Amino acid sequence: MPEKPAIVWFRADLRLGDNPALDAAARSDSPVIPVFVLPCDGLLAPGGAQRWWLHHSLLALKSHLEKAGSSLVLLKGDERAVIADLVERTGAGAVYWNRRYAPQHIETDRALKQMLTASAVSVETFNGSLWRDPWEVKTKSGGDYRVFKPFWKSLRAKGPARARLFSAPSKMRPPSQWPKSDDLSSWRLTPESPDWAHEFADHWAPGEEGAAKRLETFLDDANCYANERDMPAMDATSRLSPHLAHGEISVTEIWCRVRARVDLGELSSANAEKFLSELAWREFSYNLLFHNSEIARAPLRKEFERFDWREDDKSFNAWARGMTGVPIVDAGLRQLWRTGWMHNRVRMIVASFLVKNLLIHWTKGERWFWDSLVDADAANNPASWQWVAGSGADAAPYFRIFNPVSQGEKHDPEADYVREFVPEIAALPNKWIHKPWSAPDEILSNSHIVLGKTYPFPIVDLHGSRQRALDAYQKLKQS
């Protein structure tokens, strides 16, 4: 009788190194069948930019598995049905996976586990994506955190759940017969329109090796992190977010590498702690997602269900295309479209402009980011948008409305960022480039700029729209 194989179900953990589910399967002495299932629809189906990344990440994972004497089975459809069918077809005796925390995923995984165990198939699950499972970090009263600072203090005291990293298996036992697999090209993950292939490839190296290289490159210069992380023209941030979103590197490994640099005296404690605290916002977002199943659709603060959002498709489209007439906002949205990524400081600025200056519902911005970001994340995306809107946990106070002009002047003082992504106003002097509508006619003429033709007038008055937002928030507060 053929030996029963073990199935490793890859999800947002597309790596061999420090992968608890893969490590357990490889140590089980059973033949191992690695599989990835592409969901066809649903709120969390990958967006356009993420699909591009996924294509290349799966190619890298497949290559690494083949070097270990294995392969990657690619299947598409309803996850529960696909895995159940694969178990039946292969006669698998065990299924291993790393846990997910979005409510839709939890429901799928729980139902599948019940179905498999009822059929005498062993199911083992692991934490492969967070420092701590969301239920492990509790307030003193046993509740879940709604404020980041005490959450980070508690998480920092606990540290990662695992004290050691799992090595990538050098050799894996293949099954006696491989099940049928889709051809990756048949999934058509790389879009023809827009054609991001060349543009994205100039900025990113998807896969486990790309993640490791990016981390080491960042850590080599991380002693500038705390001072330069808010400057979008500088390459001072880690840019690990898309690698983390696809699980090409574990946060536990990042923690260990950072602490090792500190121990060697190569990285200051201040910069290390600042970087780790920023990663902890991801953990905090997953904590919120786990305890608030509707975070992507409904405000955490229920009073915001009564907020008077505006319907303005024309303004939203101008915002999405980076044609608002406000340079730092336009630069951010154009960076997003060109590279699939946006600097974090600029994300806050463009989000504030949409939800406060334009009073457009944060969910519209969240869905645009979901489709355009290579690092689109089920927890970070909605939690961050709700933070800016004021409707989330630890939210920005309602009266905090980012002034895009002063933000640009402070964080892009030489306007290198704006000039890169909004080249039509590049000739403007620094004094005027963040507010071209205020520039004297002679300056505009000398810079070959005709507002309304070569570059748009602002689609909204910044001062007037700020007051309009304050009035709307104050009305909500009073009600």
Image (cartoon, rainbow, N blue to C red):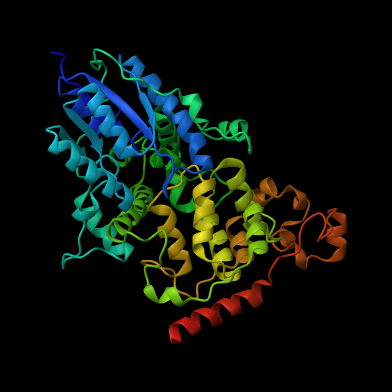
Position of 444 compared to 168: left or right? right
Of residues 65 and 363, the one drawn nearer to the viewer in this rendering: 363
Q: In which quadrant will I find the C terminus?
A: bottom left
Tally of numbered discs: 0
Percent coordinates x, y for residue 236 in the rendering: 50, 45
Q: In which quadrant will I find the N terminus?
A: top left
Of residues 363 and 470, the one drawn nearer to the viewer in this rendering: 363
User: In percent of the image, x 67 and y 45: which residue is there?
Assistant: 420
User: In percent of the image, x 84 and y 58: which residue is there?
Assistant: 450
Q: Is residue 115 visible?
A: yes
Percent coordinates x, y for residue 246 in the rendering: 40, 38
Of residues 285 and 158, the one drawn nearer to the viewer in this rendering: 285
Is 474 above or below relative to 293? below
Position of 114 compared to 343: left or right? left
Image quadrant of residue 434? bottom right
Position of 309 compared to 298: left or right? right
Of residues 40 and 159, the one drawn nearer to the viewer in this rendering: 40
Residue farthest along the bottom direction in this orientation: 478
Image quadrant of residue 28? top left
Image quadrant of residue 349? bottom right
Position of 314 compared to 31: left or right? right
Q: Is residue 165 visible?
A: no
Is 107 above or below relative to 463? above
User: In percent of the image, x 76 and y 68: which residue is there?
Assistant: 438
Percent coordinates x, y for residue 259 in the rendering: 29, 41
Percent coordinates x, y for residue 147 in the rendering: 32, 66
